[in-house]
Amino acid sequence: MEYKTTVAIVRTADYEGLDAAVAEALSLIGADRYIAPDDTVLFKPNLLMRIRNACTEADFLAAVARFIRPLNANLKAGDSPGQFRHRAASVMRGVGMDAVLEAEKIAYAEFESGGVLVENPKARHMKRFHIAKPVVEADCIVNLCRPKSHIEAAYTGAVKNYWGIIPGGEKARCHLHGRNPAEFGHVLADNYEAFLAQGKKRIVVMDARKLMEGPGGPANGFMRPVGLVLAGYDEAAVDMVMLAIGRIDGVRAVPHLAACRERGLGVTDMDEIEIKGLSIETVQLKRKAGITSTTTASLLNNFIARTVIYKYMRRMPVLKKKETCVMCGDCFNICPNRAIVWEKQQTPVFEKEKCVSCLCCVECCPQQALEASPAGLSGFFLKYPEITPPHPEQTT
Ligand code: SF4
Ligand code: SF4
């Protein structure tokens, strides 16, 4: 059978020799010839919360940036954690990534201020949603993922890392499409399919120095030393190889990889993946990787997330300082879901039923007239928002 993609496997000590391992892995797949000097290169780390093990580590971003910088000086980095308290810049500060951005001259890319509407009639669930602008504008995406167990998706690695391209609070709404693990697998595949349709250059560099295991993943699992760096061009292939190293058949164990196989997204057939560097057999773990099973725990988690946490915790805009509003319409223009009614010489009115809690309006208001308030108990009486096309009068 002919190979469709390549994945490199390289050993590294925990924190020493990381630069050399990253350079070797990227050289093995020929990344130095793949990146053009005038490309806009966007690093997409996995930023979840201000916990080091829950995120791509700052030194890993630094090591990859040091390899790419001589090839290309136009580097950016961003993500959308999509949670309520800590947004990307805050999470970056919490895990020391802000210092790396400064030291390696990487520009911060804002993922959470609105996005570009994408439509995918072939999608199972997410036929219309937004992708963060920096992703749409970049030429090459460098996916900096790490392997972790995941209470809802069983495993998160390269494919699931693109969940962060959905801006801010809209991700919470998109989550609602997946009512069980199999459905959520197709939701993640919908997102991956829409990303692939953007036609970007893609590089995946997986920080497999450690694997997060157990039901606490993806935030608070147990860290198991693995001592590897993986690199490739196909996200599904990198995930399949990582799971094979953990003695797991990704298509059987992970719903979103099963959905990718069913829909022909990425490379999920191990026979079609060329391995460079070390062989899987050489580095295979002695004990099977402890990723989460998608059974009772995930169903319960999903039910609670849908019925309680999202409705109660979601934050919505409120015109707190009406007297300072200059009726400029900036909030109306940026709203991705037509949730604001505004006419010239009038203050905006918010339609809560349509609000996707992205809070773009709050951020863009030049007068700081808007504030974000938790929906609280009133959230239980709101329907889940549907995605609507842009308003014909919107100017952005
Ligand atoms: S952006 Fe702010 S100042 Fe402008 S209309 Fe909206 S609330 Fe008023
Ligand atoms: S009204 Fe809601 S959906 Fe519209 S920009 Fe504000 S937070 Fe986002």
Image: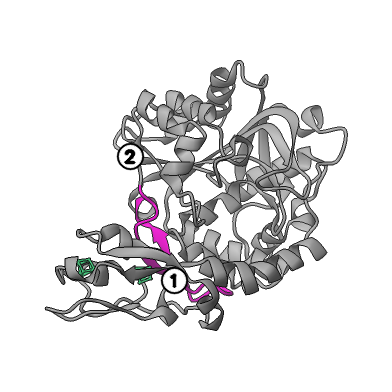
Residue at 67% across, 46% down: 239
Q: Position of residue 66 (x, y in %)?
A: 44, 23
Height in image: 188 above or below 2? below
Q: Which residues are magenta?
A: 110-134
Whether residue 119 is in magenta: the answer is yes
Q: Position of residue 33 (x, y in %)?
A: 43, 31
Q: Which mark is residue 265?
A: none
Q: Which residue is mark 1?
A: 356
Height in image: 222 above or below 100? below
**Quadrant of the rendered image containing residue 373:** bottom left
Q: Is mark 1 within 8 Å of ligand 2?
A: yes
Left or right relative to 82: residue 159: right
Left or right relative to 383: residue 272: right
Q: Quadrant of the C terminus?
A: bottom left
Q: Which residue is mark 2?
A: 39
Q: Quadrant of ligand 2?
A: bottom left
Nearest to N terminus: mark 2 or mark 1: 2
Q: How many marks?
A: 2
